[in-house]
Image: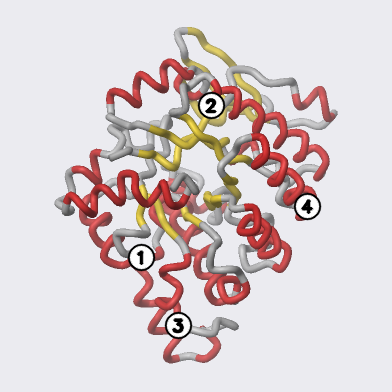
Amino acid sequence: MTVIDIHSHFFPETWPDLEKKFGTPDWPWMKHLGDGRAMVMIGQKEFRPVYSACWDVAKRLEEMDRDAIDMQVICSTPVLFAYMRKPEEAMECARLFNDAALEMCAKSGGRLKALAQVPLQDIDLACQELTRAMKAGHLGVQIGNHVGDRDLDDEGLVRFLAHCAHEGAAVLAHPWDMIGGARTAKHMMAWTVSMPAETQLSIVAMILGGAFDKLPKDLRLCFAHGGGSFAFLLGRLENAWHNRDIARGVSKHPPSHYLDRFSVDSAVFDPRSLRLLVEVMGESQVMLGSDYPFPLGELSIGRLIRSSGFSEEAKAKMLGGNAQRFLGLQ
C-alpha cells in the first residue's frame, strides 16, 4: 500500500522582493530567524511562524519517513495566491511559485508531487497557467475557495473547473480570505470557525448554484479540511431543499445526490468526526490530508485514519488508493 498525503504546503526558502518588483506594499516575504526557523511576513506584519520543512526537501523526507508516508503532494500557502492583485502580477507569482514547487519535487526522488496555483481572478490567464503547469509536471491545481465575492458557482470559475477536467488536472479547493471579520479575529477563530464555514459555503454554492449540473463528471475535485462543516450539516441543507423552494437554488437534485462529485481530505483531527465524515461521504471519497508542516495540521500524519477503527480495506483506500485515483496516478 502506497500512503499519500494529498494536502501539504511549502514556501520557497527565498523568493524575489515582490514589493520592490511590483511597486506596491504588503507582499509576502520570508524573514529567516536562524536554526531552521522563519517568520512569513506580510509587509511589516508577522503572518505565520514556519520551519525548514517548508523548503528543505531532506527535512521533509525525514519527517515523511517518521510517519510512514510514501508520497506527499505540496502546494503553496494561500497567502501567495495574489488574487486581489493585478492579474499579470498574480500570473508572475504563480509561475514563480509553481516552478519553485517543481524544483523541490525534482530533489525528492519521486516522493513529492505538486499542485500549481493560478491567477484565478483572470480566467483566461488561469487556464493558460494551468495548461503550462500540467505540461511542466504538476498533477493539478490548488485554488482558493472564492475570489472576492465570486464563489465556485460563478460562471467564470465553472469555466476554469471545466478546463481542469479537460486537462485531467486534480483540483484541491482550499479555504482562504475567511468570513467573520472582527468577530473571529481573536483566539485563531478565523481558523477554527471561519475556515470550516468557508469550505461548507463553497460546496453548498456549487450544489445550489448548479455548478455540478454543468461540470463534467470526470472533474476530480477535493475540498480541504474535511469539507469543513458540510458533512455535519448536510441534513440541515437537505431538509431545507425539500421543504422550501427558495432553498433549492437552481440545482436539479437534492444535495445528497452530489456526494459522489467531490472528495474531502481527512484533516478533521478527531476520530468521531472522521467516522461521521466517512459515513456521509463514503470511504472512497475521503483521502489522507495533513496540512503539514504547519502546527495546526496533523502532527503525526496518518495516525487519525490508522487508529479510528476502520477496516483494512477502508484504510487502504483512504491512506493511498483514493489519492492515486484523484491524482491520476492509476
Q: Quadrant of residue 152?
A: bottom right
| Amino acid type, mark 4 | Asp
Q: Mark 1 highlights which residue?
A: 231
User: 186 or 315: which is nearer to us?
Assistant: 315
> From the viewer's perspective, is residue 167 above or below residue 19?
below
Q: Please tell me how crowded label 1 is: few (under 14), some (14-19), or many (20+) other residues with Cα within 10 Å.
A: many
Q: Mark 3 highlights which residue?
A: 254
The secondary element bearing badge 2 is classed as helix
In primary-sequence order, the first of circles 3 and 2 is 2
Q: CA distance from mark 3 to mark 4?
A: 32 Å
User: 196 or 188: which is nearer to us?
Assistant: 196
| Amino acid type, mark 2 | Cys
In primary-sequence order, the first of circles 3 and 4 is 4
Of badges 1 and 2, nearer the viewer stands: 2
Please tell me the numbered disc located at residue 105.
Answer: 2
| Amino acid type, mark 3 | Pro
Q: Please tell me how crowded label 4 is: few (under 14), some (14-19), or many (20+) other residues with Cα within 10 Å.
A: many
